[in-house]
Image (cartoon, grey):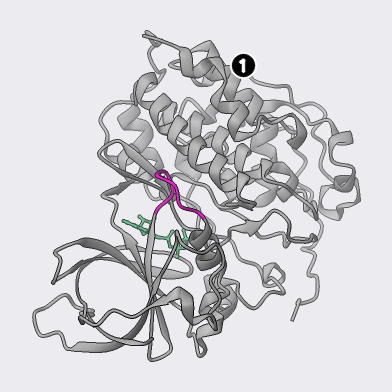
Amino acid sequence: MLITFWLIFNHSYNEKSVPVNIIHFMLQFSTKPHMQASDQAYVDKVDTPLWYKILEELGDGTCGSVFKAFNIETYETVAVKRMKRKFYFWEECMNLREVKALRKLNHPNIVKLKEVVRENNELFFIFEYMEHNLYQIMKERQRPFSEGEIQSFMSQMLQGLSHMHRNGYFHRDLKPENLLVTKDVLKIADFGLAREVSSMPPYTEYVSTRWYRAPEVLLQSSSYTPAIDMWAVGAILAELFTSSPIFPGESEIDQLYKICCVLGAPDWTSFPEATNISRLINISYSEILPTNLSDIIPNASSEAIDLIMQLCSWDPLRRPTADQALQHPFFNVGMWVPRPLLHDPLELRLNNMGTKPNLELNLWDFDTEPDDCFLGLTLAVKPSVSNLGNIFVSSVLRFYQTGVLLLLMPPKFSPPLHK
Ligand SMILES: Nc1ncnc2c1ncn2[C@@H]1O[C@H](COP(=O)(O)OP(=O)(O)OP(=O)(O)O)[C@@H](O)[C@H]1O
């Protein structure tokens, strides 16, 4: 069942690379719903050695580095994700959330995992290659997306998400970098934090990149739902119009504050658990009034504004599901002549360059499950405070300047380690 597989892994991208002998398994997505490492029936033998040539680094994330590569036999271009932690047993690999989720999820708007390879205790995922991610596209564009382009991206994202939720998974880390695009086709990627809906709470606090993190996660609710993905969809929809994040919090508490500045003070009865959270005790949101979203996003139709408002509801139960969102009148808007943006999008982009939040891992964020991709990481990944000072020039963010938030933070609460 094992085959010999060659990966030319050239760290410096020169021509003197030495082939590395790799053991690999071909995943069979369509035939059986559940593949077990011990179940040999799900593992295919391939007699011809395969060769991959690594071309360039595409991204360096928390869990792994991603490289563009091509199969020198078939000339197929692929993306190879090399995981940062070591994997000493094949069973560990098969239990990874990313593998478990992607094996089940076969959909045109979800990136395809082609193979999983383990060699010298290193783990490689071979994905179909996608040319861009949405963050790069927004950063490089000279003008905002048209409403038609945004409808297309949104519709594809929601179809992928609907498939995922129907199959019992939620993503938990939706953000523009995890939405990959080739020739107007959008696919959802990075299932490292994906979670089975049926899995039992309590879930860990650490979920998703801060700017796209739902309030119930920020408020440390112990049982959240696929609605956290719908919040992220709302934040991404707003960002597609402005090319600038709508809730660019500098810390968790600032994240809540920025959400309050747009949505107004929350109805705390939606989050009874929040009243018990020590770090909210000294914060008064009562004077924060909601902002008219059309003022922040003048180039969006009223239907788009309505959909953003619904998706970014404080109360998770009020957010539409992916299927419901697909039925929203936003997708029937024809030619929409937008009001001009208050600021030049190029200016917004320049002011936001390099301000993407790092993934924020705290010691107490580590899950109890051994398959968490970040188990092997240490405190070294704790991010520095991002340079968000400049961001306030944008039309989105000027609303945050009138702070009524009392940042009388108690000393940081340090819960015990899970492990
Ligand atoms: N299939 C692919 N094709 C092209 N580029 C990809 C592909 N998969 C990932 N990338 C690029 O690599 C980057 C990092 O990938 P990924 O998000 O899977 O890694 P990660 O370690 O889980 O990252 P994160 O820290 O965001 O969780 C992506 O933002 C994307 O730009």
**Can residue 110 be found in the magenta stretch?**
yes
Residue 374 placement (x, y as % from top left): 56, 73
103 sits left or right of 371 in the view? left
Q: Amino acid at mark 1?
A: Asn
Label 1: how many Cα within 10 Å (few below 14, some 14–19, many 20+): few
The x and y percentages for residue 146 are 34, 21
* SS category of the residue bearing label 1: loop
Whether residue 42 is in magenta: the answer is: no
Residue in the picture at 67% in, 45% down: 226
Q: Is residue 269 left or right of residue 266?
A: right
- State which quadrant residue 120 falls in: bottom left
Per the picture, the main secondary structure of the magenta-coloured stretch is loop
Camera-side residue: 360 or 412? 360
Which residues lie in the magenta part?
A: 105-111
Look at the picture and state if 72 lies above or below 194: below
Q: Quadrant of the N terminus?
A: bottom left
Q: Is mark 1 within 8 Å of ligand 1?
A: no
Residue under the image location 28 percent in, 56 percent down = 129
Residue 40 shows in this picture: yes
Q: Residue 123 placed where, x, y %? A: 41, 79
Report the quarter where the C terminus lies.
Answer: bottom right
The number of discs equals 1
Residue sitting at x 33%, y 31%: 347
Q: Indicate left or right for 239 with 148 as reference.
A: right
Q: What percent of the width, then of the height, locates residue 246?
A: 54, 33
Ligand 1 visible in quadrant: bottom left
Reply above or below: 261 against 34: above
Choose between 249 and 111: the one closer to the eye.
111
Name the foreground residue: 347 vs 222. Answer: 222
User: Which residue is at the far left?
Assistant: 15
Residue 402 visible to an observer of this rendering: no
| Residue on which disc 1 sits | 292
